[in-house]
Every structure is written in structure tokens, then in C-alpha cells.
Amino acid sequence: MTQLPLGRLGYGAAALGNLYSSMGDDAARRTLEAAWLGGIRYFDTAPHYGLGLSERRLGDFLRTRPREDYLISTKVGRLLEPNPAYRSGELDTEGFAVPARSTRRWDFTERGIRQSLEDSLNRLGIERVDILYLHDPDAYDMDAALRDALPALRRLKDEGLVRAIGVGSNSAEALHTLADRANLDLVMLAGRFTLLEQPALAGLLPHCVERGVGVVAAGVFNSGILAKAKVPAGAHYNYGPAPKELLSRARRLADVCATFGVALPDAAIQYPLRHPAVHNVVIGARGAEQINANIAGMDRPLPHELWDALEAEELIPR
């Protein structure tokens, strides 16, 4: 198990890559400055986020801070290459508001992984990252992940080029399989152990405790449905409109939280850390106001009776 001091709250930098809509350089820097002033010292990014824009913006900021004062992770598995078909004004088609000057190509070979890491270091402008995750192997090839990619990550760690290795995915089942069959330090699980849903609880999390694999919980607002104290009719879940049954469940969660004077997002931020497998919660933000709210939500004391009430209502498992 990694002993890296991740802290309770980390910053997930997908928004720095213009996820869904454009963010200016000044807004990106203000967001990162607010995270730093609020005590966040773990930052997660990926080449996928804005075709490298997230890494470049994060690197521009972190290079102004002492390297020993922060931890940074990035991901491999998707190589960025020049897009020969790019036409002026054409935007990325995978959710990021950036020019499509590059394309993503899956590559789980050792050569591809080493090239991806080198490219990321160049974009970040730093000499090393602390944690390297294999990104979304279930979306590409689980066999290649086990046969090629994860052994390559292990060699990078053995060579001292990274301090910890892991896998990032929104599939608890995929992470369970890989944590069982590979020697991982961490897994980053997005959206599958939250106040709204806990499919990771039956298999992945107890397995990680047994194997000494740390869990970083991401996507704790389930794409937005848990992000506000009052759940709006147009709330999103899994990057699309939330189904009626999940809207109803989220509103029941919000109502119980309100009886204890607790805002739903605060409970959502803190809930994953109740499990001993979870070491850190990574949350994105599009501005200083959002990141400050997240920091306050993590630091705000919540009554133990809240969790008891949510269990009694069968909204979270005992």
C-alpha cells in the first residue's frame, strides 16, 4: 500500500481541460490558487483531459511551488498524436471544449506507456509524477491491461520513475479484477462508491483492504445530482439527465441531511472516507468559489446521528 500523504481531499483537474465548456487561463489559475490556499496538496490530471490542456495548466501552476510540497498523478493508456484531419475551428468530440488538433489513440504497450509518460512530463514541465494510473482499461482491453500495461507500470516504479502505480476507472468490477491479479498501490474509482450508490462495497473495497490497495474516490457527486443542497429537476447523473428514481432517492438523501442541518454536498464529500479502504476524495471545480465550498464541506463536522438516520432509512448500507 502506498504511504504517500494524499490528504483527505484532492483536486481533479478535468475542468482545467475545458470539460463541457471553456475556462480561461486566469480562472484556471485562480481555481488552483484557491485549492492550494485551502490546503490541497494532491492534484490529479490526464492527457485525455482537454487533449493535454489540463496537464499544461496544472504544470504552469505547480512549477511555482516547491516540488516536495505536493503530489501529482497523471494517466497512461491514451496517446495524444497530431490530428492530420484537423480543420480550423473543429472541436474535440469527447466532451472537452478545445480545438481538435490532436487525437487520442489507445496504446497499452510498454513503448506507448513510456512515451505517454514522457509526453505528460513535457506538458507538465516537471521531472516526475508521483502516481501513474492506467486510464479506463475496461473501455479498451482488460487482457492487454494485465498482459502488457500493468507490468510496464510496475517496471517504471521499480526503476524509480514513479512512486506509486494504479488504475483509474468508473467500473468497480474492472478494478476488482485488476486489483486481484496485479500488484497495485492505488485504484481511483469514479462514481461507484458515493452517498447515492455503493456497488463497490460488496467486492472491491473489502478486497482492497485485504490486499493493502488504497482507494481514491472520484465522482462523489455522481455527475452533479449530489452537488446541490436541493436536487434540481434537471440534475445530471453519469453525464446525462438523471432518471426519475435516482432523483427521488437523491431528494430523500437531501431531506434527511437537512433535518440535521447538513447540506447534501457536504455529506456526499465525506461519505466515502467512512470506509477504511478510501484514502482520499478527489473533486473537480470550475472556479475558486466551488473549490472553497468543497474544502469547507470536507472540513465541516457532521453528526454521527446523520449516518445512523440514513442507515435507518435504508438510504445507505449498514
Image (tube, rainbow, N blue to C red):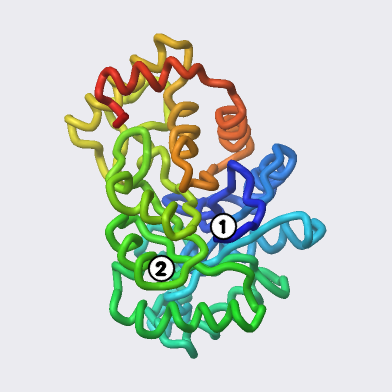
- Judging from the image, what secondary structure is the residue with disc 2 in? loop
**Which mark, by number, is residue 118?**
none
Residue carrying label 2? 90
> For the residue labelled by badge 1, is the local secondary structure a helix, a strand or a loop?
strand
Residue 44 is tagged as: 1
Three-letter amino acid code at the position of disc 2: Glu
Q: How far apart are marks 1 and 2 (CA)?
A: 27 Å
Q: Which of marks 1 and 2 is in front?
A: 1
Asked whether residue 251 appears in the rendered view, the answer is: yes
Residue toward you, 255 or 271 = 271
Up/down of 308 relative to 81, above or below: above
Seen from the viewer's position, the closer of residues 268 and 54 is: 268
Rendering coords of residue 27 (x, y %) = 64, 46
Q: Relative to residue 11, is residue 113 drawn left or right? A: left
In the rendered image, is residue 282 in sight?
no
Looking at this view, name the residue that lies furthest to the top. 259
